[in-house]
Image (spheres, rainbow, N blue to C red):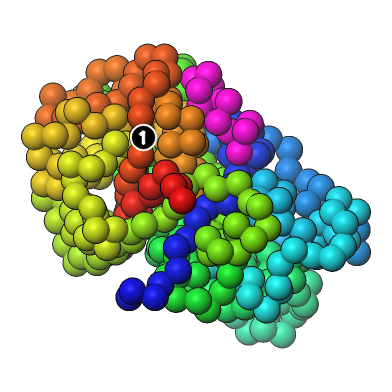
Amino acid sequence: MPDERRVVITGLGLVTSVGIGVEEFWDAVINRTSGIKRIESFDASGLQSGIGGELPDLKVPDFVPKYYRKSAKVMARDIQIAVASAYRAVKDAGLRTKCLIDRGEAEAPANINSTRFGANIGAGSICADLHELAGALATATDENNEFSLKVWGKEGMRNLTPLWLLKFLPNMLACHVTIVHDAQAPSNTLTCGEASSHLAVGEGFRTVARGDVDVCFCGGAESKINPMGMMRQQLLERLAPTDDHPERACRPFAADRRGTVCAEGGGLIILESLDHALARGARMYAEVVGFGASANTHDWASPDPSGGGIAAALKSALGDAGSAAGAIDLIGTFGSGTVGHDASEMAALDTVFGNRLPDIPALAIKGALGTSGAGSGAIDLAATIKAMQHNTVPPSLNTENLDPSCQLKLNSGDPYDAPIKQAISVAYAMGGGQNAALVLQRYEE
């Protein structure tokens, strides 16, 4: 539409296994730091893969006003990640939200209209607190010491806190974030697996562009570091086996790749209309100029070898941006490290970029971080944004021995300078169905 507003990125808030905060994250990426280690939060010895990207110490009181700290009791890990990401994002953007004012970290008045502040946040299937749930289940047995639904309904479920379910509803990520920061405009939750963050940013892009909001939280968060989350991936044969070198386990696009590694983390990005950002003198990381999404029905458990759905999303994003494959200076890949998914993505990139693919610098950061479900895309996108900001192609860990069929120009060495005016970032749901891509451009007046 000719009257659509330009949309810029003014804030990045990240929570990852290599650090909390965008600068901590970027320093780790540049310095080849891996966040993948042996899991310590629970006994993972019975799993095929006992390694993962666990977060450093995360304390909710560090990210909310004092009066809101009691709400931490009804925040699952995924919610905590989103709340921490939101705090970091508004700080990075220079926004004076209710949260920062109430914490005494920003002077009133706020520099944002709460009724024009929205949210689109991706979420996954939040794992229940197994200790809490098991304790209640143990009280629901019959005279034969077997689990009984009748006893559960009459007595067992009474041993769960009345607010227990509120910890595990996917929309509670956006709920807490918008309450804490007083974001009163439309709020949406997207639950489309690993494509969730990109889809959330794409929806936020549209919402800001058409004038429904001035500022929007966009991104996603999820923790896959729990017995249920990891067992699902194990049963689908997606996990790299544990060995003596956890930091080498996830090898995106490598000839000897054996699977991905579960992680926890995510990020929220502040999207803002250009006029609003200029009015408050904001720093612009980049401009969002194109979004594309697609769906495919190949198979819920295995990727399409042709990569047709991924290619469709890439082409759609380029078309939306009014750009062409030849104009892209950087490709932010998904690069999970599984044999089938990487092959599908390689096929899609070949389809879209053709003979130019070997000449375009590319990123594949999951070798250092693993896969954090709905939070993965936000982290990938942030890496692409920071690379654009610094005109720097960072290392992609564990990509030295590329698959012979992989034409990607991945950097397995030291960071190097490269002019990046336009970049594209892609994500897809590993369970099939959803694909999304975003085109970013260096901001110019």
The segment highlighted magenta reads 22-36
In the rendered structure, does residue 124 fall within the stretch colored magenta? no
By secondary structure, the bulk of the magenta-drawn segment is best described as helix
Tell me if residue 153 comes above or below residue 382 in the rendering.
below
The quadrant where residue 25 appears: top right
Q: Which residue reaches farthest top?
A: 414
Could you tell me if residue 379 is visible in this image? no
Q: Residue at x 42, y 44 (%)?
A: 442
Report helix, strand or loop for mark 1: loop
Tell me if residue 154 comes above or below residue 263 in the rendering.
below
The percent coordinates of residue 297 (x first, y second) are 19, 67
Tell me if residue 423 comes above or below residue 60 in the rendering.
above
The quadrant where residue 171 appears: bottom right
State how many labels appear: 1
Q: Which residue reaches farthest front?
A: 445
Horizontal side of 154 relative to 69 (left or right) equals left
Q: Residue at x 27, y 63 (%)?
A: 320
Q: Which residue reaches farthest left?
A: 355
The N terminus: image quadrant: bottom left
| Residue type, numbered disc 1 | Ile
Q: Residue at x 39, y 21 (%)?
A: 417
Q: Residue at x 60, y 57 (%)?
A: 278
Could you tell me if residue 94 is visible in this image? yes
The percent coordinates of residue 251 (x first, y second) are 34, 28
Q: How would you rate the neighbour count of disc 1 (Cα within 10 Å): few for under 14, some for 14-19, many for 20 or more?
A: many
The percent coordinates of residue 19 (x first, y second) are 64, 33
Front position in the image: 158 or 200 = 200
The percent coordinates of residue 313 (x first, y second) are 24, 59
Q: Where is mark 1, residue-wise?
A: 420
Horizontal side of 98 relative to 281 (left or right) equals right
